[in-house]
Image (cartoon, grey):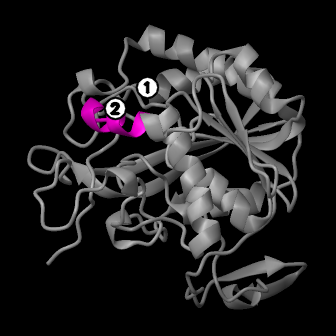
Amino acid sequence: MGLSEPIRRLDDTNVLKEKILPLCRLQKGEVWTDPVKGHRVGVCDATDPVQIAALMKGERAILAVHDPPYNFSVGGKTTQQLFKQDIQGYTGFSERWILNSLASMLEDSHLYLWLGADQREGFQPLPEMMLLLRKFTALTSRSYITLRNQRGYGTQKNWMSVRQELLYYVKGRPKFQVVYTDIPKVLRGYYKEVNGKWTENLSRSRSSTIRPGNVWLDIQQVFYRMEENVPGAYAQKPLSAIDRILSTSSLENDLVIDFFSHSGTTLISAERLGRKCIVCDMDPVFAELTIRRLEHFRSTGKTGWQCGHPFPEIAEPKGDLPLFPSL
């Protein structure tokens, strides 16, 4: 019997969310402080400077990792079911939360922004966001990273879309830490002159593996087969991708922020790598899911539920027809 998630997407069914809302320990504007390491999780509007200031409490981060709504439908869902507005409204929304993020970042800090590009609507909002970010003179563009998605669309009448866009900017001049992938260095016979000496490729580095470039093909995203899977959270990002970002752009005990927490991956990565993390989400359900994921990790050592139930209080008894079958 194949693996299947016990609940539908949380952004797809109001019936399910209405059952979860009474279980949420936070309401709009409230902030939970982790009693163990001081992480914070808030139910905050990323565009509201008052709410973000209350969340940050005067602290500023060396790294911001944001995964805002992409402004188009995904997974075969209609746009009426998901966050969607005209592009002018979307860029206005984005400008407000970017301003709040910059105010929450140190003078020398990193910004990573996950985005989508809807090939059915002129690749919006990617070009509009790139142009918008030029308005913020405090930011300098550094890289345009491509990550391979676990699934694609457009297979019958177009090239299958399997890419995920990640933009990297810096504020000031923060330090960047070199990391390596698990991919072995295999290119032989390539020589380059180094300090007047012709040196073969394999001997020019202290590592037997290669450094990651701006195309990340080595990161697994088939979530339902992985421990880190968070059922119901369709838009979660791979933990290994967030680990890579935190490892290159922060040090132990540094502060990391994420204003669109969703499944809580940034918080889990910070917990594992010894960073402090402040996150928020507008939706109390995703804020609760983020807190539960941290508590689940601490109690079990597992980074997610795979195909378990993050809200066992509403799980149906085995043998009954599921009220919220997986897609």
Instruction: Say if 302 sits above or below 223 in the image.
Output: below
Q: Residue at x 60, y 49 (%)?
A: 291
Residue 17 in the magenta stretch? The answer is yes
* Front one among 176 and 60: 60
The residue depicted at 42 percent of the width and 31 percent of the height is 70
Camera-nearest label, 2 or 1: 2
- Compared with 77, 134 (above or below) is above
Left or right: 8 with respect to 166?
Answer: left
State the residue position of label 2: 18
Q: Decide if residue 256 is in sight here.
A: yes
Q: Image check: 200 left or right of 318?
A: right
* Amino acid type, label 2: Glu
Tell me the residue at 28%/24% (across/down). 121
Residue 105 in magenta? no
Task: Find residue 60 and report its horizontal and vertical position in percent.
Answer: 86, 35
Q: Which residues are magenta?
A: 11-21
**Left or right: 32 with respect to 90?**
right
Q: Position of residue 115 (x, y in %)?
A: 48, 37
Which class describes the residues within 10 Å of circle 2: few (<14), some (14-19), or many (20+)? few
**Could you tell me which quadrant the N terminus lies in?**
bottom left
In front here: 259 or 324?
324
Where residue 82 appears, as percent x and y from the top left, is 32, 27
**61 left or right of 129 in image:** right
Where does label 1 land, which residue? 125
- Dots 2, 1 in contact, CB < 8 A: no
Residue at figure coordinates x 41%, y 14% from the top left: 87
Q: What distance separates the C-alpha of mark 2 from that of mark 1?
A: 31 Å
Q: Secondary structure at mark 2?
A: helix
- Give the x, y percent position of residue 2: 17, 74
